[in-house]
Amino acid sequence: MGLPRVGEGWRWRSAGGALLRVVVVWAVSTLTLLALAGILPDFQLRSDNGESITWTAVAAAWGAGAFGLLSALVWPLVVRAFLLVPALVLGLLVFFLNGSLLLLALRLIPDGSGAAAPETAVVVAAVMSAVASATSTALAVRDDNAYRRRLSRLATRRRGRHAQSADGETPPATVFLQLDGVGHAVLVQAVKDGLMPTVARWLETSHRLTRWHTDWSSQTGASQLGILHGSNHDVPAFRWYEKDTGRIMVSNRPASAVELQRRAARRTGDAGLLSLDGASRGNLFTGGAEQLALVLSAAARRGRANRSRAGYFAYFSDPANAVRTAVSFVAEAGREIGQSVRSRVRGDRPRTRRGGLYPFIRAFATVVERDVVVAAVMGDMLAGRTSVYADLVAYDEVAHHSGPHSRDAAKVLQRIDRAVALMAKVAEHAPRTYRIVLLSDHGQSPGETFQDAYGLTLKDLVRAGCGLPVSRRAGRTKSGAEARDAARHALLGALHRPMGDDAAEERPSPGPEPIVLASGNLGLISFPDLPGRLSREEIDRRHPALLHTLAGHPGIGFLLVRSERHGSVLLARGGDGTVEIPLAGLDGSGPLAVFGPGAADAVRRTDSFPHAADIMVNSMYDPDTGRVHAFEAQIGSHGGLGGEQSHAFLLSPLELSEPVPGGGEPVGAEQVHTVLRRWLDECRGEPFGPQVPLRQTEDHPPPGRPEAALPVAGHDLPEQKD
């Protein structure tokens, strides 16, 4: 008699454990079906052999088993058929599709029949999916082998061959998790308050925390473009007007994101941070990655080549995931409504409008986008990809409307920490070692809006300074929150409407009136009927009171304009009126002193941009309270200089080199790109240098084909199952 093969006993035990879990889940689903049949008047289970409990239970068992098999076999095929329907609509279809499967399962009962009204079938199917998922998870909590198998279902069906070092070992890989809008001070305080235990444990044992300074444009468009593509040159704000094209660029519009990415790639000659076996998840830009999910710049591409929504299929192919996310979506919208009401009752100040569609936009950012991105990152790790960059936007969206230090934002930080812990646990089961880096793209500064503080918008003030009529009823200022347009484009995609060219909004009608745009507490004023960047002298000749009106206002910190005599100058309030300081001699004193070291260099860099506005306006900043005044409807804002918005963070493993040798702090997103590139090279054991030159990639065409500057091809993302 031969000896049993190594592992044979383990395989039998594993198979037995899996069979036991199937039986238990089936039994619990049967009991759930019986309970629902007794509770819901429009849902019945009957047997041809009578109404005895035994035969009814048999009918319930048949129905539960048929529903389970249909969910496992038919559901992924059905969801794949709806792959072109993005998240917002797919989330609604989840309930109807699940209810249809239940009705079909009831018809498959051999010795009896089941009946349910369509609306009742939707409820029953949702409850059964949730109960089955919870039961399966609970049974596998203490079973490491089952946990590994459950996680392995997240991996791609076609695993790539990983690059090996000279000794045959697979080098470590890296995951960059961007916590959008979480400033350095907010992270430190959250750790002290016990809101982020995972981050606290890393700081005690395995990671170092480094602060980095953003550019003047402290917002995701500029920061993430610089981090992923190595250049954010000529990105003066979140939105700005370009006179040469007559177009308003908006960082979170697909058409603008495509153009910004093309410009960065042309300037650097490099494909991006993620060009070697990388994945980009939930970002504005691809970073040169081939594996994409929820990437805004890829949303401008149409047809089969656009796989940016493949992440939705990967996640919603599991009906339990779909039901859980849909229920969480509704709960989050309700939570926002409740928090908004309590804020009004308490009389919280500052406060901004949180009605309309905002509860659903918040739920999209904090639930749908989070769930899909986290599932995609876990799949990337289990597939062994070399580099992953993912953006979690939940905190940024909530902090804009509730405040960066609010209780609402603190609860979001707790949920983000749990998501980070889950991804760290998955990394333990990945086929290669992963080093997880947490970072942010900017912080947020609190303060009431400019309009709430002074009773008029920046546009009103500009029009008054130009001698133009001012509307007594202030108009709404667009928000620069990243999640707002992400949700909007998800809905437009569902309706099959064009997403790549918001022509009506991006190309204003030419005329003599100034164009006033807001990016947090940074304002940009342009005169579209005159070419080039106007000088102070030209502006004074045309509108003698404008610059003095702006510079003398207590809500404005300083202006940047070009001067024919002194080059560019800074204008601000002084003791006897407006003071003028040539930019060439600026040393951080005077009006910029309160904005901290590095402010003068940041302003000088923006002044060199070809598309800097005729007048760049930065709001006031109170260093004692940390307050700024956003020119849009946000009580937590970013986009300019002043306070916590300019101080982001890097949380990196100790195995990686210091961001700046000797303990310094990186300045600007482009320097952060250099740091991350160096870390990727360290993981691969290669000397620091460019990854993939632009000319070597098929997805980057020669100039003249900007629409093809995006590598959007890639395999479907992995399925996630409990």
Image (cartoon, grey):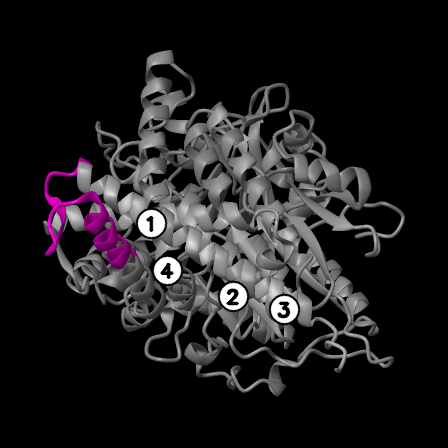
Q: Which residue is mark 4?
A: 316
Q: What segment is highlighted magenta in the picture?
A: 39-64
Gap between marks 2 and 4 measured at Cα? 14 Å
The percent position of residue 371, horizontal first and vertical second, equals 45, 51
The percent position of residue 77, horizontal first and vertical second, equals 31, 72
147 to the left or right of 345: right
Q: Earlier in the sequence, mark 4 or mark 1?
A: 1
Q: Which residue is mark 2?
A: 153
Q: Which mark is residue 29?
A: 1
Question: How dense is the environment of label 4, judged by Cα within 10 Å: few (below 14), some, or many (20 and up)?
Answer: many
Image: 599 above or below 424 = above
Residue 617 in view here: yes
Q: Report which quarter residue 43 is drawn in.
A: top left
Label 4, secondary structure: give it: helix
Q: Which mark is residue 11?
A: 3
Gap between marks 3 and 1 measured at Cα? 27 Å
Pick whichever, 386 or 604, lies toward us. Answer: 386
The three-letter code of the residue at mark 3 reads Arg
Is residue 43 in the magenta section?
yes
617 to the left or right of 389: left
Gap between marks 4 and 3 measured at Cα? 30 Å
Is residue 414 in the magenta section?
no
Image: 45 above or below 229 = above
Label 3, secondary structure: give it: helix
